Image: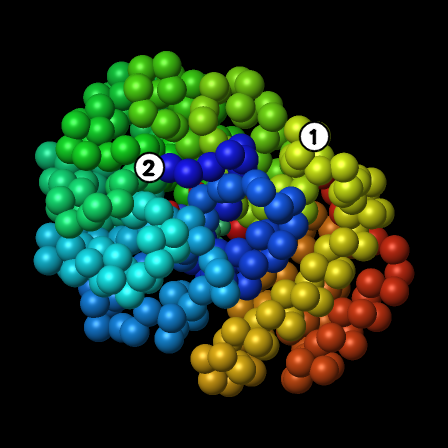
């Protein structure tokens, strides 16, 4: 795992595509290296697709150090997917690892024994890691959820040791249970215990909303890298704030609630432009496709803006890119406060 920076973006269906990655990347000071997710990629579909020709697989120019996340449980699908990624994302720096999803809690995943269902089937989970590790010259990692309670931590450690022995080179833990989905508090203690018990890198995830949280998680849990999903999507300049605090840049990032509110507005306008560029101009999708991505992004991230709700209707009502840009610009003509914390519900 190649990183010199303590924070990375989480894989999120519908969110961690090229546009958000480009936005977060552009906030990173030069020379800072971290790993980058894709959206979850279905190993049943990827072998038939052309990489770069879909919204989930298009990359930005010069993009590197990706760790695509795959979902699946069939040996042939997993191996063909990995081979394809290694062949078609040819530059050896483009992809630097493969992540296996063992956290997806949707009903379909439970029924078909992939995603979080694999956590209930240790032997099969280990086999899935082996399928991936034997097909890949790149390191393989696994992203997991929490087990039921503190008492089950030894069970989690045993599970992770088995995955490590099967070839997993690092683990990401999102310590919320499948039942919690993405609500309620993440139990960082499970990250601490895993880090103490394992000799491979551990990535900690859950409840990271601010730069303070990044440093708190590093200190409290001892994890090697912090991963943020919704918080970093809403506040992509968090990477700049972290870099500034670590002395990696002297350029001062947005700090106050009003500065962050204004930055959100600038960032959203860039997001709209980039959705138009990648999804409509590059891939030839209809504007409605890009609008749905923008609407979803605003629905997930506006909750940090103090009076953010009307922004969702401004975006939802827009019938063209021009109208959307105009409405967003007008909305941010007024100063807006961006709050450090919100209840994570989405
Ligand atoms: C809209 C959305 C989609 C997600 N999709 C995935 C996914 O495809 N794969 C995955 O491992 N986790 C997925 N997650 C979970 C995140 O990676 C992360 O573990 C979770 O949101 C907790 O981190 P956070 O509190 O920083 O958001 C998703 C989360 C959200 C909000």
Q: x%, y% of residue 105?
A: 33, 47
When asked about the image quadrant of residue 326, the answer is bottom right
When asked about the image quadrant of residue 288, the answer is bottom right
The local secondary structure at tag 2 comes to strand
Q: x%, y% of residue 102?
A: 28, 43
Packing grade of label 1 (10 A; few <14, some 14-19, many >=20) is few
Q: Residue drawn at (76%, 60%), measured in percent from left and top? A: 265
Q: Please identify the quadrant where the N terminus is shown.
A: top left
Mark pair 1, 2: CA separation: 32 Å
Q: Residue drawn at (81%, 55%), measured in percent from left and top? A: 262
Confirm if mark 1 falls within 8 A of ligand 1.
no
With 129 as the anchor, is 212 left or right in this view? right
Disc assigned to residue 144: 2
| Residue 184 can be seen in this image | no
With 338 as the anchor, is 97 left or right in this view? left
The local secondary structure at tag 1 comes to loop
Q: Residue drawn at (70%, 30%), measured in percent from left and top? A: 247
Comparing 85 with 333, the one in front is 85
Q: x%, y% of residue 318?
A: 68, 79
Q: Which residue is mark 1?
A: 247
Looking at the image, tell me whether mark 1 or mark 2 is earlier in sequence order.
2
With 48 as the anchor, is 327 left or right in this view? right
Comparing 240 with 2, the one in front is 2
Q: Which scheme is used to colour this image of the protein?
A: rainbow
| Residue 34 can be seen in this image | yes
With 241 as the anchor, is 98 left or right in this view? left
Disc assigned to residue 96: none
Comparing 252 with 217, the one in front is 252
Packing grade of label 2 (10 A; few <14, some 14-19, many >=20) is many
Residue farthest along the right direction in this orientation? 334
Q: x%, y% of residue 2?
A: 42, 38
Q: Residue drawn at (72%, 71%), measured in percent from left and top? A: 314
């Amino acid at each position: 795992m190649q990183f010199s920076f303590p924070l990375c973006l989480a894989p999120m269906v519908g969110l961690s595509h090229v546009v958000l990655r480009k936005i977060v990347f552009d906030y990173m000071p030069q020379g800072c290296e971290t790993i980058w997710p894709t959206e979850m990629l279905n190993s049943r579909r990827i072998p038939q697709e052309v990489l770069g020709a879909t919204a989930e697989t298009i990359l930005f120019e010069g993009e590197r150090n990706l760790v695509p996340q795959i979902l699946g449980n069939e040996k042939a699908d997993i191996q063909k997917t990995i081979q394809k990624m290694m062949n078609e994302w040819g530059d050896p720096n483009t992809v630097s690892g493969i992540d296996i999803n063992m956290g997806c809690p949707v009903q379909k995943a439970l029924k078909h024994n992939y995603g979080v269902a694999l956590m209930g089937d240790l032997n099969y989970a280990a086999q899935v890691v082996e399928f991936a590790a034997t097909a890949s010259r790149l390191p393989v990692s696994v992203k997991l959820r929490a087990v039921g309670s503190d008492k089950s931590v030894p069970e989690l450690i045993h599970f992770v040791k088995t995955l490590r022995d099967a070839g997993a080179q690092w683990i990401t833990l999102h310590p919320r249970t499948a039942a919690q989905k993405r609500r309620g508090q993440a139990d960082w203690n499970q990250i601490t215990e895993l880090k103490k018990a394992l000799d491979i890198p551990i990535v900690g995830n859950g409840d990271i909303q601010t730069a303070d949280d990044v440093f708190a998680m590093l200190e409290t849990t001892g994890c090697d890298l912090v991963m943020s999903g919704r918080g970093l999507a809403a506040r992509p300049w968090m990477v700049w704030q972290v870099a500034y605090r670590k002395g990696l840049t002297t350029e001062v990032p947005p700090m106050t609630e009003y500065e962050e509110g204004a930055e959100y507005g600038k960032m959203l306008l860039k997001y709209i432009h980039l959705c138009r560029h990648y999804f409509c101009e590059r891939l030839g999708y209809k504007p409605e496709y890009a609008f749905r991505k923008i609407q979803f992004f605003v629905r997930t991230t506006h909750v940090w803006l103090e009076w953010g709700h009307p922004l969702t209707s401004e975006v939802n009502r827009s019938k063209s890119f021009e109208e959307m840009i105009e409405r967003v610009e007008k909305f941010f003509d007024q100063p807006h406060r961006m709050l450090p914390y919100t209840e994570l519900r989405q």
